[in-house]
């Protein structure tokens, strides 16, 4: 990527693949700095990664149905929330109204 930028063939950040400035970049620097021992399991912040984030809108579920005993926070994926109706009796409604 760096070489492509130098020769004028780089991509603007908006045109990069998903994850390049998020998880991929974070993982790269954690490994580069030797900080792997400080990392926590995925379910600590993202127990419902990817398509599982749709469960936030599932009527009849609660937040406790979506987390594990190691969960200390939830990463709410912006792209998965846009334009969706937040109905009562869903985990996202519970988060917003607690």
Image (spheres, rainbow, N blue to C red):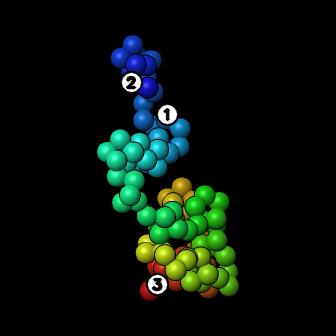
Q: Residue at x 38, y 24 (%)?
A: 2
Residue highlighted by disc 3: 97
The percent position of residue 22, horizontal first and vertical second, equals 44, 48
Counting from the top left corner in percent of width and height, residue 51 is at: 65, 60
**Secondary element at image label 2:** helix
User: How far separated are the C-alphas under marks 1 and 2?
Assistant: 15 Å
Dot 3: few (<14), some (14–19), or many (≥20) neighbours within 10 Å? few
Left or right: residue 39 compared with residue 51? left
List the residue tagged with mark 1. Answer: 15
The residue indicated by pointer 2 is 2
Nearest the eye: 87 or 41:
41
Q: Is residue 29 above or below residue 65?
A: above
Could you give the CA–CA distance between mark 2 and mark 3, rounded to whole angstroms? 45 Å
Q: Residues within 10 Å of mark 2 (few under 14, many from 20)?
A: few
Which mark sits nearer the N-terminus, 3 or 1? 1
State the CA–CA distance, disc 3 to disc 1: 36 Å
């Amino acid at each position: 990527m760096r070489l492509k930028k130098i020769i004028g063939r780089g991509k603007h950040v908006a045109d990069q693949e998903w994850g390049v400035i998020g998880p991929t970049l974070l993982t790269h620097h954690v490994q580069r700095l030797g900080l792997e021992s400080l990392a926590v399991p995925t379910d600590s912040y993202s127990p419902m990664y990817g398509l599982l984030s749709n469960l936030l809108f599932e009527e009849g579920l609660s937040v406790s149905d979506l987390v594990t005993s190691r969960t200390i926070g939830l990463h709410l994926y912006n792209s998965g929330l846009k334009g969706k109706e937040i109905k009562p009796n869903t985990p996202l409604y519970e988060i917003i109204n607690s």
